[in-house]
């Protein structure tokens, strides 16, 4: 029996679709299997962290339309999303990742559980000029240091502008920030500069914006700062401040009382070369990003070195960095690290957390558990 030409054409298209779909489903994950997933510390030591994934663009988070996926199978075209210009700081709340971008002048939001992406700080109300340090309170409200405007902008977790804290005359060069879980106090790091004596942490009422007190002054003695970079609040309620040009971490009570110091300049573990941001995990351990080392170091609250994670590299890759700057830790213990040069956010999962557990999983996957 002779098959009409039109039928042959239709049959051919159907066969091609079938072959492509089968091939797509049957392709072995060679690229993943051939790459060794970084583990820290490496064997034979017991693993404490696994490298989990990287976020480069919105396409790494947002669910793809089925028709678009089928089209890419035919054309071979890569999936394209909105990337980052010059990311700096990072904050995270239940898998919702906030990344400040000094080049694009907004905060990118990669909402992993809900598979969506949006931006904060583009609207006239609450517009950002040079966003740097970020933090979130216990409700997921976002606090952003705007280094150019010299104030703090506050938004809810969906990006709605709430209020401004501080004004330009109050700061020399604000860079880092921490807010308590209740959203009652804000600690803003004022880095000062070579010609400024304002090297300090300024403390504000987060609701009224009233200035409450200052912590530290310029110097190298205990309790003094030289180009401080960032601050975080530990599980113990103490403040951990990265004292950048003194190459150390200083610890204070919330009223500014000096407690202790650890670290120092050097190339050995437990020392610093270019420390940037700081974060603490649910166990109270302290994490410090060092841009020169291309890694982050983990310390006990009293400064004992536990582990170094990541490596400096001239070529991008898993756990590879050239200019890391920001770090944040979610409530499930996952660690989020920003690299400015490679324009990415790397995510690490603690070994005690299952791969399909915690906040940074799709809601559909979490619902099946």
Image (spheres, helix red, strand yellow):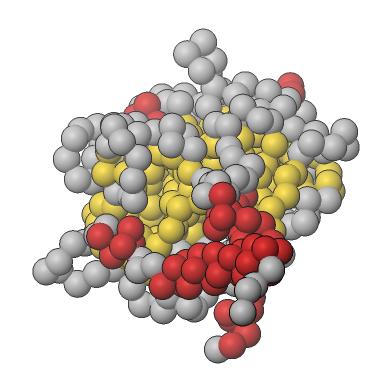
Front in this rendered view, residue 327 or 39: 39
Of all residues, the one furthest to the bottom in this rendering is: 369
Of all residues, the one furthest to the front in this rendering is: 1
- Number of numbered discs overlaid on the protein picture: 0
Q: Residue at x 66, y 30 (%)?
A: 104
From the viewer's perspective, tell me whether residue 202 is left or right of residue 125. left
In the picture shown, does residue 347 fall above or below 124? Answer: below
Residue 323 seen in the current view = yes
**Figure quadrant of the C terminus:** bottom right
Of all residues, the one furthest to the left in this rendering is: 44
Of all residues, the one furthest to the top in this rendering is: 195
Q: Residue at x 83, y 46 (%)?
A: 161
Residue 179 seen in the current view = no
Please state the horizontal and vertical placement of residue 1, each as a whole percent of the image. 61, 79
| Quarter of the figure with residue 132 | top right
Please state the horizontal and vertical placement of residue 7, each as a whole percent of the image. 68, 69
Please state the horizontal and vertical placement of residue 10, each as a whole percent of the image. 67, 66
| Quarter of the figure with residue 198 | top right
In the picture shown, does residue 142 fall above or below 5? Answer: above
Please state the horizontal and vertical placement of residue 230, each as a whole percent of the image. 50, 40
In the picture shown, does residue 352 fall above or below 105? Answer: below
Q: Residue at x 35, y 40 (%)?
A: 316
Front in this rendered view, residue 69 or 126: 69
Q: Residue at x 61, y 30 (%)?
A: 102
Front in this rendered view, residue 76 or 157: 76
From the viewer's perspective, tell me whether residue 141 is left or right of residue 314. right
């Amino acid at each position: 029996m002779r098959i009409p030409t039109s039928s042959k054409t239709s049959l051919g298209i159907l066969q091609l679709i079938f072959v492509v779909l089968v091939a797509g489903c049957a392709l072995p994950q060679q690229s993943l299997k051939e790459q060794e997933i970084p583990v820290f510390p490496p064997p034979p030591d017991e693993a404490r962290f696994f490298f989990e994934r990287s976020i480069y663009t919105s396409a790494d988070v947002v669910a793809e339309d089925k028709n678009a996926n089928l089209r890419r199978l035919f054309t071979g075209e890569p999936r394209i999303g909105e990337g980052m210009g010059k990311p700096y700081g990072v904050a995270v709340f239940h898998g919702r990742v906030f990344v400040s971008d000094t080049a694009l002048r907004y905060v990118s939001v990669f909402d992993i559980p809900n598979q969506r992406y949006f931006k904060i700080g583009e609207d006239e109300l609450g517009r950002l000029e040079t966003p740097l340090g970020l933090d979130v309170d216990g409700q997921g409200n976002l606090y952003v240091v705007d280094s150019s405007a010299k104030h703090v902008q506050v938004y809810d977790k969906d990006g709605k502008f709430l209020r401004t804290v501080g004004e330009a005359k109050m700061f020399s060069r604000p860079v880092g920030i921490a807010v308590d879980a209740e959203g009652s106090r804000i600690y803003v790091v004022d880095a000062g500069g070579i010609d400024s004596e304002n090297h300090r942490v300024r403390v504000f009422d987060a609701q009224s914006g009233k200035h409450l007190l200052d912590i530290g002054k310029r110097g190298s003695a205990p309790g003094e700062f030289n180009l401080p970079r960032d601050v975080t609040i530990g599980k113990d309620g103490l403040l951990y401040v990265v004292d950048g040009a003194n190459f150390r971490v200083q610890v204070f009570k919330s009223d500014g009382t000096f407690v202790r110091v650890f670290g120092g300049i050097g190339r050995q573990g437990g020392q610093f070369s270019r420390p940037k941001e700081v974060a603490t995990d649910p166990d109270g351990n302290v994490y410090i990003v060092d841009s020169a080392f291309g890694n982050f170091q983990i310390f006990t609250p009293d400064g004992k070195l536990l582990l170094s994670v990541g490596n400096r590299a001239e070529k991008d890759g898993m756990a590879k960095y050239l200019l890391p700057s920001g770090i944040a830790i979610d409530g499930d213990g996952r660690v989020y690290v920003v690299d400015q040069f490679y324009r990415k956010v790397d995510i690490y999962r603690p070994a005690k957390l299952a791969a399909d557990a915690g906040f940074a999983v799709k809601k559909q996957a979490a619902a099946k558990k």
